[in-house]
Amino acid sequence: MSSDEKKFERVRPDVLNATTLLEVAGRLGDLFDLTKSMIPSGVVDSFDILVTGSKPQQVRKESSWFNVSIYNDADSTDSVFVSVNKVGADKHEIKPDDTYNVNMGAAKIYSLFFRSSRNGSATVSVTGVR
């Protein structure tokens, strides 16, 4: 027999079954964790924030949101730009008495950045679901 040939050993059926079951259990555990991260717990965070100036203001909670609804109060004197998770990324304008909704389908919203459009001020109501 040459040195390039591989030698195979027979494995007992009970050892093969146990190994296969462990592999399946590990993959099912991974699927369970993934599915669990895609189901909201139903906790609702609701708060108001006063946005002033053109410097971004960050809002961050202790756990991520699945979806967020942002309402710019009708009494606000200015539009507000909002970015999700990164400063300046995909800025969305919210005019006074307007609402912007973000739904990621999983708990991926961990930070919001607000800035006023003309150095004015605006009161923004945020409702997020964890």
Image: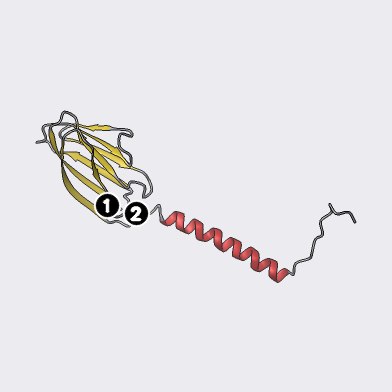
Residue labelled with disc 1: 61
Label at residue 112: none
The residue sitting at 21% across, 35% down in the picture is: 55
- Residue farthest toward the left in the current orientation of the protein: 75
Q: Is residue 120 left or right of residue 43?
A: left
Question: Percent from the top left, x then y, of residue 14?
Answer: 70, 71
Left or right? Give the position of 41 relative to 121.
Answer: right
Q: Is residue 26 left or right of residue 37?
A: right
Q: Which amino acid type is marked by label 2?
A: Pro
Q: Quadrant of the N terminus?
A: bottom right
Q: List x then y, in percent, for residue 115.
A: 21, 35
Q: Position of residue 52 (x, y in %)?
A: 15, 37
Vertically, is 29 above or below 118?
below
What residue sits right under mark 2 in the picture?
Answer: 40
Measure the C-alpha gap from mark 2 to mark 1. Answer: 15 Å
Residue drawn at x 15%, y 31% is 119
Q: Amino acid at mark 1?
A: Lys
Q: Quadrant of residue 36?
A: bottom left
Does residue 45 lie above or below 77 as drawn? below
Badge 2 density bin: few <14, some 14–19, many ≥20, Cα 10 Å: some
The foreground one among 117 and 17 is: 117
Q: Crowding near pointer 1: few (<14 within 10 Å), some, many (20+)?
A: few
Q: Circle 1 sits in a helix, a strand or a loop, which is it?
A: loop
Of labels 2 and 1, the one closer to you:
1
Q: Give the mark nearer the N terminus: 2 vs 1.
A: 2
Mark 2 secondary-structure assignment: loop
Q: Count the marks: how many?
A: 2
